[in-house]
Amino acid sequence: MLKKDREDDDNDNEGITLVTSDSKSRYKSNGKGKDKDKGRGKGKYASSTENRRLVWNQIVWPLVLEVNKSWFSIDEYHKKRDEYCRDDTELRNKVSGGFVSLIVKGLLLKDKDSEVYSIHWKLVPYMRRRLWLDYGEAIRLVSTK
């Protein structure tokens, strides 16, 4: 494998190395330039989906089944979240981002007047029957028209 530094003066290509091998070439980052991935290993959308899935499967849906109502208060959510996260601040950051993302996706709805969150109306029959509803199924139910 032959490595050859690119000699462009463009700031856009700073930190990019041309790698050539058997007449195939591709660019890869050598760690000196701007790296948007920041070592996560996943893209922005995959990380958001993973966070939503984590919050839905581990906190929100078990809480909904536990309280046996289609809504829950912010205090009930905080209690369940704290029980799940313990002292892990990195996990707490993922959970907070996943919770907000569930609201943006429409799985959870926030009441304007009080600190109450409710699930989407299409998910209520599953809650009444006390069925386990995975994140994938829930998002399909909510997004289909």
Image (cartoon, rainbow, N blue to C red):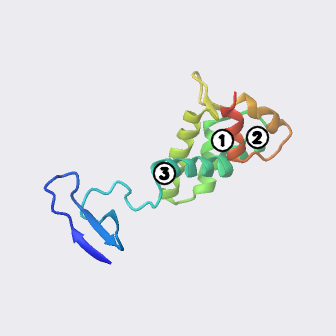
Please indicate whether residue 61 sits to the left or right of residue 22 in the image: right
Nearer the observer: mark 2 or 3; the answer is 3
Q: Is residue 77 above or below residue 110?
A: below
Q: Residues within 10 Å of mark 3 (few under 14, many from 20)?
A: few
Q: Amino acid at mark 3?
A: Asn
* Sequence-wise first label, 2 or 1: 2
Residue 53 image offset from top left, x and y in percent = 62, 49
x then y, percent, for residue 96: 52, 46
Looking at the rendered structure, the kind of residue marked 1 is Glu
- Dot placed on the residue nearer the N-terminal end, 3 or 1: 1
Percent x, y of residue 71: 70, 32
| Picture quarter with the N terminus | bottom left
Q: Say whether marks 2 and 1 touch (CB < 8 Å).
A: yes
Mark toward the start of the polypeptide (2 vs 3) = 2
Q: Which residue is mark 2?
A: 67
Residue ranking furthest to the front: 23
The residues bearing labels 2 and 1 have C-alpha atoms spaced at a distance of 9 Å
State the mark number for residue 93.
3
Is 9 placed left or right of 110 in the picture?
left
At x 24% / y 64%, what residue is drawn?
32
Q: Amino acid at mark 2?
A: Val
**Secondary element at image label 3:** helix
Picture disc at residue 76 = 1
Q: Residue at x 62, y 30 (%)?
A: 109
Eye-nearest disc, 3 or 1: 3
Q: Nearer the viewer, residue 16 or 124?
A: 16
